[in-house]
Image (cartoon, rainbow, N blue to C red):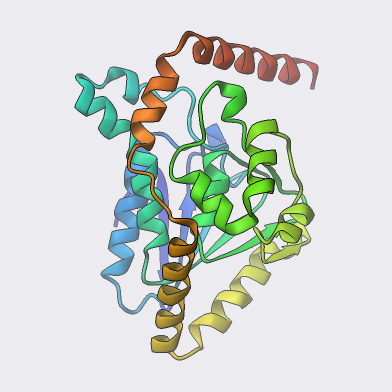
Amino acid sequence: MDFETLIIEVNAPIARLTLNRSERLNAMNATMLRELAEAARWFDSRREVRVVIVRGAGRAFSAGADLRDSSRSEAVGWLARREAAQAGSRMMDAVEGMKATTIASVHGYAVGGAVLLMAACDLRVAAEDARFSIPEVELGIPLAWGGIPRLVREIGPAMTKELVITCRQFTPEEAKAMGLVNHVVPPDELEQHTATLAEKIAAMPAVPVAITKEHVNAVSRAMAGQTSYADGDVLLSAFASPEGVEARKAYIERRLERKERG
């Protein structure tokens, strides 16, 4: 299946899904969000695929939502804007609901929505040089894409509040201690370690693996009381607020200053 922003490689029973906007650090625009959901559904139609490795091309896993994406502002009418704002939540649900076991293979930066995409995967392997952050509050918007209930169920209420409200960067070792990451490995061992884990899972009996995944996901959703139906509405309101506009402007200016100094 051909995609504009993704590379799909299938060597059954293992497949690889690569975020492929390396010139933008794999920032997720509307096209990528839509294609990730489409890819998840496509994999579900391929019964021979047992494990899907999700990774990023180039220097990073993903820089999160693309701040330059204009699809939300260009959408005509409230319903169209709401549809665009809900794209992230729909992508997350599609990835989390995939029949195959998913493994996030993370290197470089994983920012905002990229942390959530990682959390939507069943297992997560991070290189020691990976760096995580959730900067939405600093951008003047709440964390959407079903992010709050997912993080609460993964790392608990207190750590969710700390990481989302302070927007501080955290390391793979911290993420592993929280339970957000399964394995932390040297950068040059990331690909092989992930492949070995995928092969081990693919070699297991298919039916109990599928049942275990569905059972754990069902219990997790029940524990978190997960609901994100209004994320798009909340996001639209925050984007329109004067304070949010100023916060995003200041955030971008700080990033540019850091680039100039670095």
Q: Nearer the viewer, residue 118 or 142?
A: 142
Q: Is residue 56 above or below residue 236?
A: below
Nearest the camera: 30 or 10?
A: 30
Residue 195 versus residue 184 in the image, above or below: below
In which quadrant of the rendered view does residue 209 lie? bottom left
In the rendered structure, the answer to whether residue 166 lies left or right of residue 218 reads right
Residue 53 x %, y %: 51, 64
- Identify the residue at horizontal 59%, vertical 58% (top origin): 154
Name the residue: 52% across, 66% down. Answer: 122
The residue that appears at 30% across and 77% down in the rendered structure is 47
Quadrant location of the N terminus in the rendered image: bottom left
In which quadrant of the rendered image does the C terminus lie? top right
* 114 vs 41: above or below: above
Q: Position of residue 38 (x, y in %)?
A: 29, 53
Q: Nearer the viewer, residue 136 or 191?
A: 136
- Visible in this render: residue 130? yes
Q: Residue furthest bottom?
A: 205
| Left or right: residue 155 compared with residue 99 | right
Quarter-of-image position of residue 195: bottom right
Residue 191: percent from left, percent from top: 64, 64
Residue 4 in view here: no
Which residue is at 78% across, 60% downward?
186
